[in-house]
Image (tube, rainbow, N blue to C red):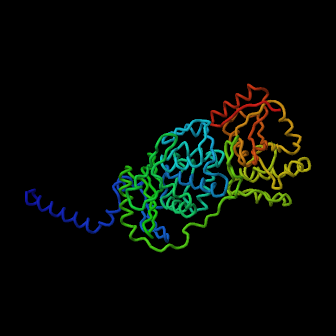
Amino acid sequence: MPLTMSTITAAAKRMSQCLMAATLIGGAVLAIVPAQAQESPDRYSAIVIDANNGKVLFARSADDRRYPASLTKMMTLYMLFDALESGRATLSTPMKVSAYAAARPPSKLGLKTGSTLSVEEGIMGLVTRSANDAAVVIGEFLGGSETRFAEMMTAKARKLGMSRTTFQNANGLPNDAQMTTARDMATLGIALREHFPQYYKYFSTRSFNFRGQTIGNHNRLLGRVEGVDGIKTGFINKSGFNLVTSVVRGDRKLVAVVMGGRTARARDDHMADLVKQYLPQTSTRASTALIAAYNPSARGPAVTAHAETVAEAVLPSAVPVPTRRTSNINQRVAEAYGANATGAMNAITAPERRSVVGRDAIREALEANDRAAPNVATALAAAPVPRASIPNVITQAAATPMPTASREIASGWVVQIAATPAEATAYDILSEAKQRAGSALAGAQAFTQAVANGSQTLYRARFSGFADKAAANAACDALKSKAYACYAIAAN
């Protein structure tokens, strides 16, 4: 057909009619699928949940795995709130800043190595500036190391029903193995409100003063959309711009998640549209709790004084430990071998004779401990539940005679890397340090030493076996290069 002005006009008219029809037919979809979703389908996902009854009002790729970025800090805060609730910390508890934490890239508070950060300052730093250094300080305080803390975070996620989430660090900085979903993040958002209403108010903080500087909140929906009371923003290149939002307006409540925004503004605009469209559809009657009832971690010692503390933690409750010496080897292997074999190994003292892992390692340690039991009965009397360590770790009880093997520690030089109220944490720190330091600690022997600190007992995490001060200092230098606090002292 020859092109004429009339055919061009007719074609344009038909195209206009088709576009109008598409708009009318698909208007609802176009209203809720943002530009960034069309441009980055591999990163976009979203969900809107009625926080009164759990009904899903909107979902797009809600179960597809995405990078959480700083949404990770929601779980870091969940773990810290749990420590507050169970008495293992107070808002004024000081947390030590390691060289590793201080070196995290921005956003950050600019903390100095060796300084301290109070628990409340840490909370405020995460909810406003999304400070990466503060997140690691919290992780090291609660877990002894960031790696250990990430394991604890993942274990907690499973208990909350976050089945597709794996954490690798405390702050959300890039890690290809750290993944989540929009649905899991919504679950965590609801859990924070339901389990910790007394601390949830921190998420609505607009700004706070940190040592002379005023820090504003990254969440721009606070004050922009009526009823928004948090929760968290996030961004890394691989994730795009993420946001979890909670809204309470009268009797209506919702939690919404947007992940993969092209820009912060596009993400915020899309979230505002979702709230506007779906909040009127929420129920006005609250049902029972949407997340499993909160079960606080075992209460630990109050930690208001930290004259020597580097890190304080408890093992996740998912990690079982042997409970009776009367059970046979097979029973105790079954009891010990849970979700984390390292945690189970932290009850027996046994030298490492060969490279073994998993059940075989636990069996060998148990058998060695049974053979040695008559010789260490005095030391074990101080701990009815058997303590265990990594292979080649010796427990030194301050108030009881030491086993023969540990008397060798009484001369030469030792290096100390931590002191913590949880003996199991000291074991974990020693285990990880020995692995990370490599040849620098090849001939060193790890041990813990209990010391009184006011009303508390602290457990020093130490290595011995250094012939002189120079050797001990060399080991310290290697440990410091791996972000461990370390100093050498002459053993008495």
Residue visible at 92% across and 50% down in the picture: 374
Q: Is residue 465 above or below residue 181?
A: above
Position of 263 with respect to 208 (left or right) is left
Q: Nearer the viewer, residue 291 or 34?
A: 291
List the single residue furthest toward the left. 5
Residue visible at 39% across and 67% down in the picture: 278
Q: In this view, does 467 lie above or below 385?
A: above
Q: Quadrant of the N terminus?
A: bottom left
Q: In this view, does 148 lie above or below 271?
A: above
Q: Image quarter for residue 25? A: bottom left
**Residue 40: horizontal and vertical position, in percent?**
38, 52
Q: In which quarter of the image is the C terminus?
A: top right
Q: Nearer the viewer, residue 408 or 13?
A: 408
Q: Nearer the viewer, residue 216 or 246?
A: 216
Q: Nearer the viewer, residue 441 or 386?
A: 386
Position of 25 with respect to 246 (left or right) is left
Q: Image quarter for residue 473? A: top right
**Residue 231: horizontal and vertical position, in percent?**
48, 56
Picture mark count? 0
**Residue 8: horizontal and vertical position, in percent?**
12, 58
**Residue 219: horizontal and vertical position, in percent?**
43, 52
